[in-house]
Every structure is written in C-alpha cells, then in structure tokens.
C-alpha cells in the first residue's frame, strides 16, 4: 500500500512513518517542517527505497494537487495539525488555518485525485483526531468517551479539530469520499516535542528546574504510548470499516500529579540526584484557562471489531520514554531553543 502521511515529521506522524516503512508500505511524508517538526524523527527510514519526503504546507492547495498527481497514493493518513492547547489560546488563528482550512484543502485534493483515478473502492482518507473534541468528563470511572459521545470542544485547539472532523464526515456524505476517522487519547513516548507535559517534566527535572503542574494536579488523562497508537492507526487504515470512527485509548488513566510522581520515581532510579528526590522540584502553577477535568476513552469498538489493544501500561511506557530521553540528548537539546519552548504559554485568556 502506498500511504500519503501528512505531518510525518511530527511526533505521532513520524511513529506512523517508521512503523509503516518497517512493515513494507511505501510512504510519502508530506510536512511543512514548522516549529515542532524534525526530520531526525524519521532518519531511521530516510534512506529506505520505500520512503519519500515532500515538503509542503497543507494550506497550499496547488502543492497538494501536485503531490497527489506525482505520488498517486492508495490511502491518506492525515495527521498534520497544530496541536498544543496552550499555543491555541495565545494564537488561535494558526489552528483555524491549519486544522480547518488545511483539512479542507486535503479533502478537496484527495477527492480530485480519487475521482481522476476512477473512484477506487480501495481508497481511504484516514483522518486522525483527538478525544478533546468530546469536551470534559466527570471524575467517574464508569463514564468514558465513546464514538457516539456528543462533541463539546472547550479550547481553540479542540474546536478546530472538531471542525475538521465534521468536514471529513461531510465530504463522505456529500461526495462519497471513502473515509475513516480515529480519535485518540494523550500520546507520549520517544520523539515527543519538548513543550508537552511528559518531556517538559523529564527535561526540567534533569536541568534542576521546577516541575510545573497546572492547578492541583487532579486533571485526569488517558495515556497512550505513541508506538501503540501508530499500530492502531495502520490497522484502521487497512481494515477499518468505511465511514466509521474508532476511539483509540491507552486504558491508562492517571491524574497529572500521579503521572509526574511516577516520572520522578523512575528518574530517581535511573539518574539519582546528589540528594533528595526529583519530586522535590514539583511546583503547582496557575491552571490553564478552560482546563478540561478528565479525558477517558472506551476503546471497545476497535478492540471488538479489529482486535486491537494497547501493548504497554503507562508505567512500562514511561520507563521506555525516560530511557529514550536519557539516551538522546543530541535530539532534544537543539529543540530547547525553538520559539516558545520553555516558556509558559496560554495565559492570555
């Protein structure tokens, strides 16, 4: 299968690219190389005859038409997006332009190619989204997001992703474009750009800096190891039912405070401080505006229909993640100088 992967130099996209190439798929990586993208993320497959890179912005329709005509993909995996909630609070325009207008351009370019190719039944447009489109859940373990949960986005980021989800469904209904959708829980793992919670905690801990936790740390997230997510995404694009959505969760709910305490304990073992624990650096900071209380996914559909389950617990995944960051300073050190990294964002509301 020839896959056109947008955002393939980003965190989740690069995990998809690496796994797809390792499984014998031909992959075209389309990425604008914005601030959070790193071609080093896909260096392990960069010389493979199955891999090609085409730098382009999904807001550029002419570039997309050229890429579809050149590469003639069997399926699209659309991951390119602005994804940092705090940045969306400070600058929502980029999220509207990339996540909404960019997805519109992708849908139109894909539809034009699909029609030109004779509307093949095997073609798929796989739109990758987030559980944040569903809003916030109460602290009740019996209540989880399902594929029929009503949309209730609370941030500019989640609203832009919700809009893109609706566009994809509309193109399926109106134009017959063959689509599948997935909504995932919080990802973590190797190559995670150092502006999200887990890499921030690891790198701040190593640097002796405060470990910032919003509010009282009681916000709950369901944590999904990125390589498990990539496995699920490939399964959906290959075997998912047409015009159906699948929620992908790690089945690993933790409060933010619990998560940070686990990271500190792992670091205490793997790179102990001269005295005390990394947990001594935990600092509670003013909460983010509109911070959702809890996300949790019910992954029954993908488990029952496609046989997928996460392969690691959050403790196992965090152990692997810490090991990776300890061994890959040459990757993350240059990224600390990029715009906004290490700065508290999302406080303008």
Image (cartoon, rainbow, N blue to C red):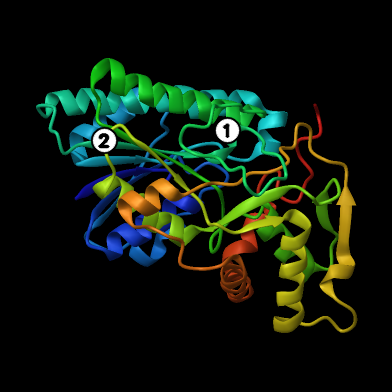
Residue 320, image x, y percentages: 56, 73
Look at the picture and state if 236 lies above or below 325.
above
Left or right: residue 144 compared with residue 263: left
Q: Which residue extends farthest left? A: 118
Residue drawn at (55%, 62%) of the image: 189
Residue 191, image x, y percentages: 54, 60
Q: Secondary structure at mark 2?
A: loop
Look at the picture and state if 175 lies above or below 205.
above
Is 116 or 320 nearer to us in this picture? 320
- Give the CA separation, mark 1 to mark 2: 22 Å
Residue 134 badge: 1
Residue 140, image x, y percentages: 69, 45
Q: Secondary structure at mark 1?
A: helix
Left or right: residue 320 compared with residue 196: left
Instruction: Specify whether residue 60 is in view.
Output: no
Residue drawn at (36%, 19%) of the image: 170
Quadrant where the C terminus is found in the figure:
top right
Is 284 or 253 nearer to us in this picture? 253
- Image quarter of residue 182: top left
Residue 242 badge: 2
């Amino acid at each position: 299968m020839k896959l056109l992967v947008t955002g393939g130099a980003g965190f989740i996209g690069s995990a998809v690219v690496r796994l797809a190439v390792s499984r014998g798929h031909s992959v075209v990586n389309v990425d604008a190389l914005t601030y959070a993208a790193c071609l080093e993320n896909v260096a392990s497959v960069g010389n493979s005859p199955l891999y090609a890179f085409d730098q382009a912005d999904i807001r550029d329709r002419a570039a997309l038409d050229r890429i579809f005509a050149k590469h003639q993909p069997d399926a699209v995996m659309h991951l390119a997006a602005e994804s940092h909630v705090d940045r969306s609070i400070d600058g929502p325009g980029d999220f509207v332009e990339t996540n909404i207008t960019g997805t519109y351009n992708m849908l139109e370019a894909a539809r034009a190619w699909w029609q030109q190719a004779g509307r093949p039944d095997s073609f798929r447009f796989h739109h990758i989204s987030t559980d944040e489109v569903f809003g916030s859940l109460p602290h009740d373990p019996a209540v989880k997001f399902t594929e029929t949960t009503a949309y209730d986005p609370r941030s500019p980021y989640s609203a832009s992703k919700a809009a893109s989800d609706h566009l994809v469904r509309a193109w399926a209904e109106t134009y017959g474009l063959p689509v599948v959708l997935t909504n995932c829980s919080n990802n973590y793992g190797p190559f995670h750009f150092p502006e999200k919670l887990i890499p921030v905690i690891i790198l701040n801990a190593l640097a002796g800096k405060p470990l910032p936790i919003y509010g009282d740390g009681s916000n709950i997230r369901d944590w999904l190891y990125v390589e498990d997510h990539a496995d699920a995404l490939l399964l959906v694009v290959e075997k998912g039912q047409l015009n159906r959505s699948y929620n992908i969760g790690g089945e690993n709910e933790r409060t933010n405070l619990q998560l940070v305490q686990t990271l500190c304990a792992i670091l205490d073992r793997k790179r102990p401080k001269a005295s005390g624990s990394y947990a001594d650096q935990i600092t509670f900071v003013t909460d983010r505006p509109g911070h959702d209380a809890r996300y949790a996914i019910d992954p029954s559909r993908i488990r029952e229909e496609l046989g997928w389950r996460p392969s690691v617990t959050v403790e196992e995944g965090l152990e692997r993640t810490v090991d990776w960051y300890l061994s890959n300073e040459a990757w993350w050190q240059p990224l600390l100088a990029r715009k906004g990294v290490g700065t508290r964002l999302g406080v303008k509301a």
